[in-house]
Amino acid sequence: MADSPSLLILLSAPSGAGKTTVCQRLLEENPLVCRAVTCTTRPPREGEKPGIDYHFWDQDRFVRGIAAGEFLEHATVYGHHYGTLQSELRDKLQAGRDILLAVDVQGAATIRQKAAQDPALKAALVSVFLTPPSLAVLEQRLRKRGTDSEATRQKRLAVARQEITEWRSFDYLIVSGTIEADLQHMRSILAAEKMRIGRVAPPVFS
């Protein structure tokens, strides 16, 4: 897997910044990119399908997964557990697939730490941070989404204020504009990383 040109594209953003929409659009238009299906203990939202959007596990199953070392990273976000299965990533990378993984800032930090000790993950990893230009814009988006109470919305904003300070830890920063503009930035990053020295077969002149 260390010699694989596959990419592990790690996209992180504050809640409500639009990472889910960007991921969905990128996956719809690029059949060569697949998503990593993460595990969560939160209940499915309307329209979400088990095994496609998330692996919906109960608390006991998730705890057993932690004890067995099944997760590359896991975190508790707003009272629910989320985790990325090691097998989910390694199997797809070994098969030559590019993986798009949307995680929170805490999860991204853990994955970067693990990748620093794993040559295969380190070679594949590309991290991107997506953020609105200001907390005011983020608050507008959260209100427009209309899925949270005022108390939950303010809690998300407080967490976002801390998360945004971590942007320097990522390879790329996208200051969010329109969905189409954000998507074009992701396309550009993907294209650039595919041309990075070490991932491209060198020319042969003989």
Image (tube, rainbow, N blue to C red):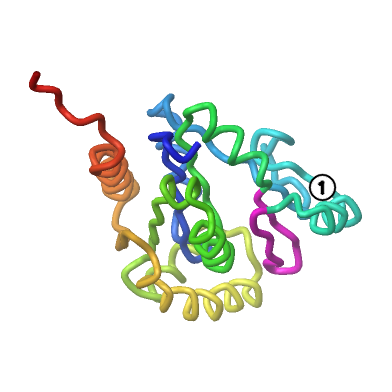
Determine the image quadrant of residue 172.
bottom left
Above or below, 186 against 171 in this view is above
- Give the total number of marks visible in the rendering: 1
- Residue drawn at (83%, 53%), measured in percent from left and top? 68
**Where's residue 24, x and y in %?**
48, 39
Instruction: Name which residue type carries label 1.
Output: Trp
**Where's residue 132, x and y in %?**
36, 66
- Residue drawn at (38%, 28%), measured in percent from left and top? 29
- The verdict on residue 74 being magenta is yes
- Residue drawn at (42%, 40%), measured in percent from left and top? 7
Secondary structure mostly seen in the magenta stretch: strand
Q: Position of 189 compared to 82: left or right? A: left
The residue pinned by badge 1 equals: 57
**Where's residue 120, x and y in %?**
49, 45
Above or below, 28 against 2 in this view is above
Determine the image quadrant of residue 103.
bottom right
**Residue nearest the observer in this picture, 50 or 123:** 123
Magenta residues, as a range? 72-84
